[in-house]
Image (tube, rainbow, N blue to C red):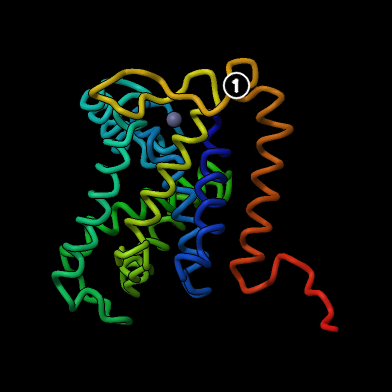
Amino acid sequence: MLGRDHALSGAVVLAALAPPLHVGIAHLAAGVVLGAGAGVLPDIDHPDSTISRSFGFLTEWFAWVVDRISGGHRHGTHSLVGIAAFTAGAYGAGLFQLSEPKALTAGHLGFSWHIVPAALVLALLYSSALRALHIGGHFGDLIGVAAALVTCYTGADLVQLTVGAWHVPLLATVVALGCAAHIAGDELTHGGCPLFWPASMHEFHLLPRPLQITTAKLCETWIIFPLLLAGLAVAVWHATGHPLAIPQPSK
Ligand SMILES: [Zn+2]
């Protein structure tokens, strides 16, 4: 699947789940764009992917390291262990940020090392979302870094969402959902994903073989992409407080 469609799928999942997760309108845009970024995150195991090129040689080097650790493209980062590792990283960055309350005060612009890991994760997600969706051109990375700093300094990434019985910060929730959307997307293609890596290399598919899609071919361009765009529009419409069904007149 193309980076663009992976990013859109992450954005759709975030927007669709915003009402049950109680993501307020104030945090919806950040959540949806970060969801798009998390939607391309598992491809950080490939030096040529959208996310690996987002900060030049820095992210390309990081992608090389991830590629070595995770056993190559579409292995570790495309498994349940991968989702858990990315989510734990985002959660840990949030905990570190929280451990220095001064860095969180809205409007407080003092520097603290405690915001650095969260700011790096946020900048990576924002910039790769913009890059994957072809928004912002050469300024996409700058916009991503600026958005990351604003998000950190307002503490928006730490807003607690109710996920079942747990309270999970926005950033960790977004990373988990975006990575899951990515893996589901790759499971629609011929490649599939080894969900139970490293215990098993069996590749899981969501579609029977004749219906599996080929990346960047007609089906992805003319069916998947328009469906994702329409889904995003409907999900954002609903998440911003508009009912999906036409209300029936009361008798
Ligand atoms: Zn992938």
What residue is pinned by disc 1? 212
Q: Residues within 10 Å of mark 1 (few under 14, many from 20)?
A: some
Q: Position of residue 160 (x, y in %)?
A: 33, 70
Evaluate whether residue 149 shows in this view. Answer: no
The residue lying toward the viewer, choosing from 22 and 132, is 22
Evaluate whether residue 215 shows in this view. Answer: yes
Kindly identify the residue that appears in the image at 22 percent across and 64 percent down.
115
Element marked by disc 1:
loop
Q: In the shown orientation, is residue 15 left or right of residue 47?
A: right
Kindly identify the residue that appears in the image at 16 percent across and 62 percent down.
96
Q: Position of residue 126 (x, y in %)?
A: 43, 53
Number of marks: 1
Q: Position of residue 77 (x, y in %)?
A: 32, 32
Compared to residue 1, the image places residue 152 above or below, namely below
Q: Position of residue 146 (x, y in %)?
A: 40, 62
The residue lying toward the viewer, choosing from 144 and 81, is 81
Tell me which corner region of the image, top left, top right, bottom left or bottom right, holds residue 166.
bottom left
Compared to residue 205, the image places residue 130 above or below, namely below
Amino acid type assigned to the residue bearing label 1 in the image? Gln
